[in-house]
Amino acid sequence: MVLDQIAGQGQDASLRDHADEGDQRSLSAQHLELIIKPMAERFSEVRRLGTLGRDYAERKAQFLRGIVSSKSEMDADWYQASVWVVLKIIEGEDIDLIQVDPSCYPTLEAVWLGCIKRLRAYYLWQCSDAGSPEGNYFRASGEIRRRLLESPRSPAHEFDRVRSYISGSYLTDSSPARLDEGKPAATALIRTKARRIYDNGGGAGPEADWARAKQYTRMFYENIIGAVVDDDELKTLGVLKAFQFSKCPQNRYWITNAFEAAVAIHFLNKDILQQIIRRPESYDLSMESVADWPLGVDLPESMWFDKADRLLFAAGPVDESDKDHLVHTLRHHDRHIRAVENLYRQSRLGPFEEMIL
């Protein structure tokens, strides 16, 4: 892996140097690009050198000059470098989210949390291998989850810029604020998440993918401001439901981006988070795509059907007797039976805390 070639190249020092320049509280998009650019060049260099034999050191300069990178390769190098920098922001050791100017937020949004976990898992493999790629990945996930639950909370006034960015990009001006699909940034965000579901094999069709992506976006962005500004427990609960969004194995952990994770890690009230974590069924939410729901078939109190988004929901674990009763009632509706059984299996997955982030 190219990261092995890059380790120890002094990039942490470069990151600190840039963070120390000028206003400690505001890292502009231009500064962020100055940090990412040399890392992208390093990834590009190591990738191209990987095709050489053992004598690559002597041929390095000539060989690199002779290789023309495609746009997709250069984009991949840039993305790898962005993941590395954003991991540093998530960890908050060399650079902190509150140092980052809002002009940088799209860079964080372009990085998936899953990629951050894989990079951290690679470093864990280097230092203390857990014995399997999955083991290292889940250790990395646990580290990020502990940051959410335990890391010091940033000062409340530092949230002002984040709040302004979220409100201007994604929410209506109404009270309470709602996701505004009429804003180009909101539409683009939903589209990106829907495509992510499809690309990772969890898709159930364009309409279902869009509905899932929109539900996640609603849960996070309609709740995060109240959760931070008002220390609202119900809003905080809504954010946690987003972070364990769709526990089914086909699309688990895939549509949270690094911006969303970083905001929650830095600004959510840790005491409220700890209280909620002790009541796991309160934030457990499962969903299954189904085009409609038959008239006259009542759902138990913990389940409901969203007609607009064509999603069947369950809050907390579905009781086996409720599932069996529904299956019997729906005995002439095969696709609805499949939806209920899939929802039941999702709702029984655990431990719940490990479904968050």
Image: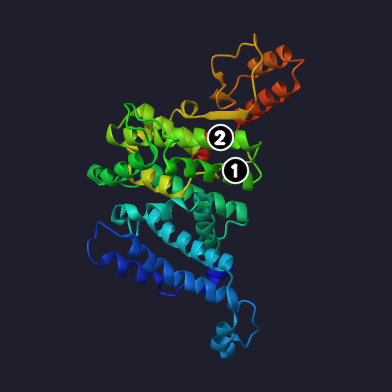
At 46% across and 61% down in the image, what residue appears?
82
Q: Residue furthest bottom?
A: 58
Q: Which residue lies under the disc numbered 2?
A: 212
Q: Position of residue 137 (x, y in %)?
A: 56, 52
Q: Is residue 337 visible?
A: yes
- Give the total number of marks visible in the rendering: 2
At 48% across and 44% down in the image, what residue appears?
188
Label 1 element class:
helix
Work out how far the residue at label 1 is from the one at label 2, CA to CA, in angstroms.
Answer: 9 Å
Q: Which residue lies under the disc numbered 1?
A: 197
Judged left or right of residue 275, residue 297 is right
Judged left or right of residue 298, residue 262 is left
Q: Are marks 1 and 2 in contact (CB under 8 Å)?
A: yes
Judged left or right of residue 24, residue 300 is right
Displayed quadrant of residue 312: top right
Q: Position of residue 194 (x, y in %)?
A: 56, 41
